[in-house]
Amino acid sequence: MRILITGSAGFIGFHLSEFLLKKGLKVIGIDTLNNYYDISFKLRRLKILKKYKNFKFNKLDISNKKKIDNFFNKNKIDIIVNLAAYAGVQYSLQNPDIYFKTNEIGFYNILENAKRKNIKRVLFASSSSVAGDLKKKLFSELDFTDSPISLYGATKKNNEILAHFYAINYKIKIIGIRFFTVYGPLGRPDLSIFKFANSIQKGSPITVNNFGNHYRDFTFVDDAIKCVFKLLKIKQFHKIDRKKNKYFQIFNLGGGKKIKITKLINILEKLLNKKAKIVLGPLKKGDIISSQSDIKKLKRNIKYFPNTSFEKGLKKFVNWFVNDF
Ligand SMILES: NC(=O)c1ccc[n+]([C@@H]2O[C@H](COP(=O)([O-])OP(=O)(O)OC[C@H]3O[C@@H](n4cnc5c(N)ncnc54)[C@H](O)[C@@H]3O)[C@@H](O)[C@H]2O)c1
C-alpha cells in the first residue's frame, strides 16, 4: 500500500505522514517547500520524516503537469491524499494567481492522474472557508456553500465541485475534508495561535481583529489525523450517506465547539505566565466571523470525533512552543 501525500512538509501533511509511517505504511511525499511562511518549519518537519526508511520525498510542484505526470508514470500509488495548497485567507486576496495555479490547476493535475492511473481512492483538503459568511450557528455539510468570501474559500469550493465530477464519472472514491482551524505542535506560524503565543512571549503587541469578536472551531492536530486515518480506511459510507452518493462525500472535521478568540488569548497568557498586550482592530476582508462544525456525519461514519479539550490541546502546543521551537 503506497500512499501519496502532497504537501507532506506542511503542518497537517507532516503529522499525517508521520502517523502513517509509524504504522509501517509506505508514504511518498511531495512538496514544493514554498516560502509562504518560514521554510525552516518545513525543513524541520521533513528532517523528522526522512528518518523513516518507508518515507520517500520528491520536491515537486503539483501545478507542473509535465513533472507530475512523469512522477505518476514512475511511481505506483494506491491512495492519494492531496493537502498541497496555499492555505492563508488574507494572502489569497493579495496573490490570486498563485492560489489559482496551486489550488485549482494543481489539484486538477492530481485528479487527472488518479483517472489515468486508475487510482481508486483520493482524499483532499477542503476547508471551513467554503462556508463564507454563513449566518448559522452550526455549519453542516448540507449547508449552502456557493458564496465563499475569500479567494482561498472559492478555490476550495471549486475543488469540491471538480472532485465530484471525477468521482462520479471515473468511479474514484473521493472524500473532501473540510478542516476547521487545526492547531498543535510544529504548527503553522501564520495562524493566530502561533502568532499570539510568539507575541506574548516576546512582549510585543497582538492585533486582535474584529475587536475580539471572532469565534473559531479549533481542532487539535492529533485528533484531526486520527479522523483522516479513519476516513482513509472507510470501506463504505454510512447507509444514509451512501444512498446519496457512494463515490463522493464531504466531511466536516472540527472540534464541534466554538471558542472566542479572547478566551484563546486568556489561556495562552496563563500557560505562558505573561500578560498579552492587546491592540483591537477592525474585521478584515475575507475573514469569517464565526465557525463551528456540525460533526454528526463524521461521527456516524467513523465512530470517532475530535475530543481533546481546547485547554489540553493548547497545553501540548505551548509545551512544544516553549521547549522545542
Ligand atoms: N491548518 C488548518 O487549519 C486548515 C484548515 C482548513 C483547511 N486546511 C487545508 O489543509 C491543507 C494542509 O494545510 P496545512 O495547515 O498543513 O498548510 P501548510 O501550508 O502547512 O501545508 C501545505 C503544504 O503544501 C505545500 N505546497 C504548496 N503549494 C504546492 C505545490 N504547488 N506543490 C507541492 N506542494 C505545495 C507547501 O509548501 C506546504 O508545505 C491545505 O490544503 C489547507 O488549505 C488547513
Image (spheres, helix red, strand yellow):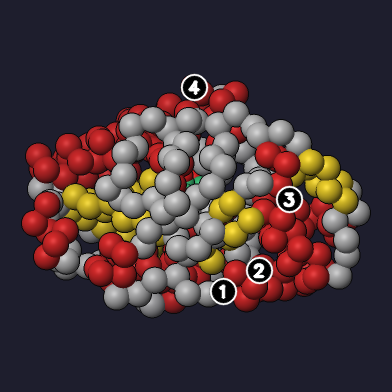
Q: In this view of the protein, which residue sits in the foreground, 103 or 274?
A: 274
Kind of residue indicated by mark 2: Leu
Label 4 – label 3 distance at C-alpha: 26 Å
Question: Dot 3 surroundings within 10 Å: few (below 14), some, or many (20 or more)?
Answer: some
Q: Earlier in the sequence, mark 4 or mark 1?
A: 4
Residue holding disc 4: 97
Q: What residue lies at 63% left-to-right and 56% top-to-bottom? A: 260
Label 3 – label 1 distance at C-alpha: 21 Å
Residue holding disc 2: 314
Kind of residue indicated by mark 3: Lys
Q: Are marks 2 and 4 in contact (CB under 8 Å)?
A: no
Considering only vertical position in the picture, is 129 above or below 312? Answer: above
Q: What residue lies at 73% left-to-right and 67% top-to-bottom? A: 267
Where does the C terminus fall, quadrant-wise?
A: bottom right
- x, y percentage for residue 279? 83, 42
Q: Are marks 4 and 1 in contact (CB under 8 Å)?
A: no
Q: Earlier in the sequence, mark 4 or mark 3?
A: 4
Q: Secondary structure at mark 1?
A: loop
Q: In this view of the protein, which residue sits in the foreground, 15 or 194?
A: 194
Residue holding disc 3: 195
Instruction: Answer with left or right where residue 56 lies relative to residue 10.
Output: left
Label 2 – label 1 distance at C-alpha: 9 Å
Residue holding disc 1: 309
Question: Dot 4 surroundings within 10 Å: few (below 14), some, or many (20 or more)?
Answer: few
Q: Secondary structure at mark 3?
A: helix
The nearer-to-camera label among 2 and 1 is: 1
Q: Quadrant of residue 148?
A: top left
